[in-house]
Each structure stands twice: as structure tokens, then as C-alpha cells.
Image (cartoon, rainbow, N blue to C red):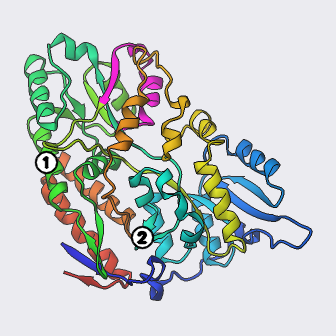
Amino acid sequence: MTSIRHSKRTAARWAAALLAPALAVTALASCSGGSEPSADEPVTIDFWGWVPGLEDLVAQWNDENDDIQVSFHRMTGDDGQKVEAAVDAGQGPDLVQLSTHGLPEYVITERVVDITDYVSEYADDYTPASWAAVSFDGRVFGVPQGIGPAGTMYRTDIFAEYGIEFPETWDDYLDAARTLKAANPDLYIANLSPGEIGQWSQEIQQAESSWYGIDGDSWTVGVNDEGSQLVAERWQTLLDEGLVTTELMWTPEYWALVNSGKIATITYAAWFPSILAENAADLAGKWSVAPMPTNAGSENSGDSGGAAVVVLKNTKNAEAAAKFAAWLNGSDDTQEALITVGGLFPSTENGLASPALLQESEFYGGQTVNEVFIDAAKNTPDTWVEGPNYGTIQTALLDEFAKVVAGQQTFLEALDVAQAAGIADLKSRGLSVEE
């Protein structure tokens, strides 16, 4: 296990000496973090986001809050990079949507504001895992907005044809994979995509492992830790025994495999069932959703990641911005719209209890599939810790996974290579790495 030293006091000071230099001013430069209020004028804050339907929710807020008005910009294309450049140049909006995987980088570069004093009272309103994703060193740097709890979509007709019960554990899953393959050599339990990190990370979290952790004054890095090795050995067995296909996900070749009936299961996040229904419409009534198989002795599920709304450092109105973010993501008034229009799977307890989630699906034989994902959200451990160079490690892993699929190395070897690459990158950024 390798550790990276950081400050005890707040996560915003972990790498204060390593602040990124200001980037060139972009088209965002005119956006100066909202207006300062006068005695006769309301506070105005600028919010950038991508979730469908946010315009209507912003309008609702503005109608109900004369003292705080929100101006909304819909993010497209490279707007995320523009936000970074603008903030570094002293500009930028007050609020922005952000993947939780990218939040530590914003904390380290001091692009975000510590909003603990404004939102900590809402911690119990969110799932433990989602709140942990926005919390560092006991401080809070965002309000969770949507999560990706995992479940397994499976072909009920295929399992019935071969007399196999859907597996409850990963050990049973391997047995089912072998049974299917023996009965029909053209049938595979799943597709193992070497380019889809979410399907890997959801099993890592299920195993209560994490690429990062915090130990006293240090970061810890565990890309090749015990839980990751468990997942690697599982995938290696599936690959070595020819029990999975290895097409890149989202390609025409992948969907051809799905539609031809050669893939019996797909394990992924709560947003995937609708995508499957859109791309395999002719298979309506042949799929169902079950909890993802569990590790022996555990009821844990997993999650592939979510998003948050964060307050950026150049704001003049951090408290007002945090108040709006808390309302947007956690209010009873917003949950139905975020689910039905925004397409989010909620990170809040009131969202998980919303009737808007409990819609029957014709494609899945009338099943209320979100019941599976609600249970998964409640059974996701809060052990995953976001870290400072997630993107670097992700890229390294995917590069090495491609070599595994090509037969050039094993998954365990890939983990070691990615671990070393992550450490080297952190050192190149000037972070102190203890080995």
C-alpha cells in the first residue's frame, strides 16, 4: 500500500503549494461568479449544469425566492474544461455540476468552496455512499446529485431454457456461466468490455475497496488491493475459460451480440435498463433485473459513480449558492422532476421513497425494476474514496485491460502497472509519495 501525504486541517489545503497556474481566459471570462447584492436587489448566482429539465426547476426556485435569483446555463461539449479555465483565471459561475470522480482535483486546486457550514445538516438526508463522495477530511465540498447503483439485467428465457436459477453470489455466477457454456458453446454469461471502467469500479466498491483512502496525514492508494485482486481473479477466470465476449461496449458489434441472444447478463448502473430497452426493443419481455451477485458472506452492492453540485471559489455568494444546491438536489419539491425529466437516480432518502421511481416496465415484463436499484443504493458501502488523479488511473487501467483481453498479461499484472502509473503521475505533480 502506498501513501501520499496531505494536510490534516482541510482537504482544500492538501496540495496548496501545487495550485494549478491560471489558464488562459476563455469564453467564460465574462462570467464573474454572480452579482453582489445591494439593499434593493436580490442576490444573483450563475449555475451551469447538464441534467434535462433544470431550466424549469430554476424557474420554480426564482418564482419562490425573491432574495436569491439563479441564472442557468446548459452545459454542452467542452464546457467542463471552460469552467476549469475560467475559475483558474479568477472568473467562472457560482455553481456547476461535476462528476464526483473529478471533485478531488477541484479540491486540491482550490477551485471549490468548503460548504460544510451551510449543508452539513442535510447529511442524513442522503445515502452514506453519496455523502462520502463529497466529503474529505471531515469537510463537505458539494451536494450529491444522482448515483449509479448496480443491478444485473438477465435473459429470463435463457436461464429458464437451461434450468438455471439466477445466481445470488459470484461463485454461483461462475457456475452458471460454465453450465451455459457447456450447454451451448455460442452462449456467454456476459460481455467483458475492456473499455468500460464503471463495470469494474462497481465491483471494487462492492468489495469495500477503493483506489484511494486517507490514513492519518496520508493519502493511501490501493489500485491493486485485496478487493481489487478478488475482482481481477473473477474476471480472469471468466476470460480464461471463454465464458465472456470482449467487445467494446456501445459499439454496433456489442449491440449485435446482445440482440442475437449470445449474452445472458449485463451488470450495470440504474441508468442502463432504459438504454438496453432502446437498443434491444425486439427482446421485450425476455429480460428481467435482479440484484448484482454478491461476494461470499456479504450483502453489499456496488455503484459506478455519481455527480454533485459544487460551489466554485470565485463566488461572492457561497451561502446563497449552497442553499440553492441543497434545495435543488434534496427538496421534496424537486425529486419527481429530477427522476422523471432529469433521468437521475436519486441520492436522497426522499428520492428513493418517491413514487416516481416505481414505474412498471413493459420491456422487463411489467417489473418495477427500480425496486432492485433502490435496494442496491441502500446496500452500497461508503468505503469508496475519491482521489486526486482518478482520470490518470482510469486511463492506465483501461490501457492495461486491453492488453489483458489480447492475452498479453493478466488482470493482476494490469493492476500493478496501473498502480505504478498512478504513483508516478502523483509524483510528477509534486505530491509527496511514501512507499
Disc 1 residue type?
Gly
In the rendered image, residue 216, in percent from the top left (x then y), is placed at 29, 79
* Number of numbered discs visible in the structure rendering: 2
Q: Which marked residue is nearer to the observer: mark 1 or mark 2?
A: 2
Q: Nearer the viewer, residue 161 or 377?
A: 377
Q: Nearer the viewer, residue 297 or 75?
A: 297
In the rendered image, residue 291, in percent from the top left (x then y), is placed at 29, 32
- Image position of 366 with respect to 67: above or below: above
Residue at the extreme right: 40
Residue at the extreme top: 161
Q: Is residue 163 left or right of residue 144?
A: left
Q: Secondary structure at mark 1?
A: loop
Circle 2 crowding by C-alpha within 10 Å: few under 14, some 14–19, many from 20 = some
Q: Secondary structure at mark 2?
A: strand
Q: Is residue 57 left or right of residue 250?
A: right
What is the distance, in whole Å, between disc 1 and disc 2 at their CAs? 39 Å
Residue at x 73%, y 54% (from the top left corner): 72
In the rendered image, residue 271, in percent from the top left (x then y), is placed at 45, 36
Residue at x 82%, y 61% (from the top left corner): 67
Q: Is residue 195 magenta?
A: no
Q: Which residue is mark 2?
A: 136
Disc with the residue nearer the chain's start (1 vs 2): 2
Residue at x 62%, y 58% (from the top left corner): 79
Q: Is residue 433 left or right of residue 412?
A: right
Disc 2 residue type?
Phe
- Quadrant of res 332: top right
